[in-house]
Image: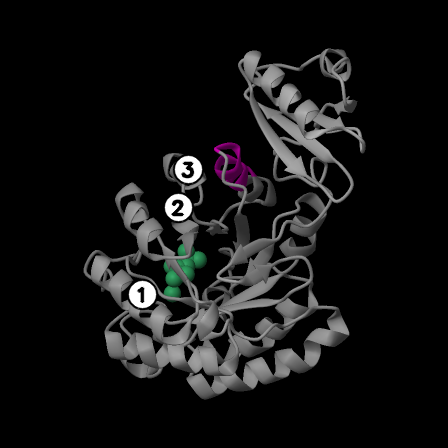
Amino acid sequence: MLVVMDRQSTAAQVDSVVRRIEALGFRAHPIPGELRVAIGITGNAGPLDPGEFEALPGVLQAIPVTRPYKLVSREVKSEDTTIEVGGHVIGGGTFTVIAGPCAVESESQCLQAARAVQAAGAQLLRGGAWKPRTSPYSFQGLGEEGLRILDVARRETGLPVVTEALDEESMDLAEKYADVIQIGARNMQNFSLLRRAGRASRPVFLKRGMAATLEELLMAAEYIVAEGNYRVMVCERGVRSFGSHARNTLDLSVVPAVREQSHLPVFVDPSHGTGRRDKVGPLARATLAVGADGLMVEVHPDPMQARSDGPQALLPEQFLDLMTLLRAMAPLLDRRMEPAPSRAERR
Ligand code: PEP
Ligand code: MN
C-alpha cells in the first residue's frame, strides 16, 4: 500500500500517518517527492483497506501496490533516486564511472590504479579486499589490510571507495572503511547479508546474480530497502549463457527494463560481462547509449601480473581513451559526466 499525501499536507500530518501505520504493527517508509510525500507500507501480511488511511488528515489517496517489489518500484516513486557519495551525485542524469582493480593486491598497485583512474576522470574507485573466487586455492584478497590500502588511496586521490563485502563480518569492516558497499553476483540472494546491508550506514552497490531474472534482482534490492537503507544501486554484470566468445552474456536489455520498473540507479559492468579487455570498450560505450546511470570497469596498472581478472582489466591508457570517448558521447545522450571529486571534497 502507498499512502499519497496531499500537496498541502504538513510535516505533522505526515508524522501522524507514519505513527498510525506503526501502531498497526507495519513499517512506514516516507518517500519525499518533488510535489508531495508518499508513504510506503510494508510488513502487512494481506491486503489493507485504503479507506482506513484515506480518512486521515492530509492524505490524498491510498493505492494498493501491485508489483511484488514495492519500495523499489516506479509505482511507489516515479522520480529517479539519486545517491550522494563523497560530494558526487549518482543518478538523475549523471553518468558515473567506478573504476579500479579487481582486487587490492598491494599499496603500490592500488595507488597506481587509483591515480590513473582519477586522472582519467572516474568519480569512484573500486577494489576488492575479499574476493569471491571459484577455487579456494586462488587469491582470496588481502582482507582488512586491503581496506586500509583503499583508505590510503582515498586520502591520496579524494575518490570515494567501493568495496565488496562477502559476509556479515566483512560488511562490518567495509562499512567502517568504504564509502559504498558492494554485494556481488554470488551473494545477490544471500538474504541475511541483504538484510544486514539494509541496516548499513553506506549506500549499497548490488550486482545481478549470474542467473537472476529482473524480478529477482529487484526483489533482492527490495530486501535492502525494506530494512531502511534507501541508497541502493543495481548493476548488470553479465549472465550465464552458452557462448564461449565472452565470459558472460552482458544483458544490456535489462537496463531499460530496470529503468521502467524501478527508480533505482542502474549500472553496467562490462569487465565481468565480457571477461576480455578488447570487448570492454565497445560495451562500455553501449552502456552509456542504453541509458544506464553508470559504469563499473576494472583497470590494472599491469594486468599481466594481476592476481585476479587480469584478462579483462584495461590498461590505464586504454581507460583514458575510453573516458575521452565517453565524455564526447555523453552530451548527445543527455548524460552529464562530472569531474572526479577533488581532494578538497574528500571525507
Ligand atoms: C567484482 O566486482 O570484482 C566481482 C567479483 O563481481 P561479480 O560479483 O559481478 O562477479
Ligand atoms: Mn573482478
Mark 2: which amino acid?
Asn
Ligand 2, what quadrant? bottom left
User: Is disc 1 surrounded by few (<14), some (14 to 19) or many (20+) residues within 10 Å?
Assistant: some
Residue placed under numbered mark 3 in the picture: 199
User: Is disc 3 surrounded by few (<14), some (14 to 19) or many (20+) residues within 10 Å?
Assistant: some
Q: Is residue 48 above or below residue 132?
A: above
In the image, is 237 to the left or to the right of 21? left
Question: Which circle's residue, 1 or 3, is located before the other in the chain?
Answer: 1
Regarding mark 2 in the picture, which secondary structure is present there?
Answer: helix
Mark yes or no: residue 135 visible.
Answer: yes
Residue at x 68%, y 30% (from the top left corner): 11
Question: What range of the chain is rendered magenta?
Answer: 219-227
Q: Quadrant of the C terminus?
A: bottom left
Mark yes or no: residue 70 visible.
Answer: no
Q: Position of residue 226 (x, y in %)?
A: 52, 32
Q: CA distance from mark 1 to mark 3?
A: 22 Å
Q: CA distance from mark 2 to mark 3?
A: 17 Å
Q: Say which of 57 and 196 sits in front.
A: 57
Q: Position of residue 92 (x, y in %)?
A: 68, 57
Label annotation for residue 187: 2
Structure colour scheme: one colour
Q: Position of residue 120 (x, y in %)?
A: 50, 82
Question: Which circle's residue, 2 or 1, is located before the other in the chain?
Answer: 1
Mark 1: which amino acid?
Asp
Secondary structure character of the magenta stretch overall: helix
Mark 3: which amino acid?
Arg
Task: Report if residue 269 lies within the magenta region.
Answer: no
- Label 2 CB-ligand 1 distance < 8 A: yes
Choose top left, top right, bottom left or bottom right for residue 22. Answer: top right
Residue placed under numbered mark 1 in the picture: 151
- Label 1 CB-ligand 1 distance < 8 A: no
User: Is disc 2 surrounded by few (<14), some (14 to 19) or many (20+) residues within 10 Å?
Assistant: many
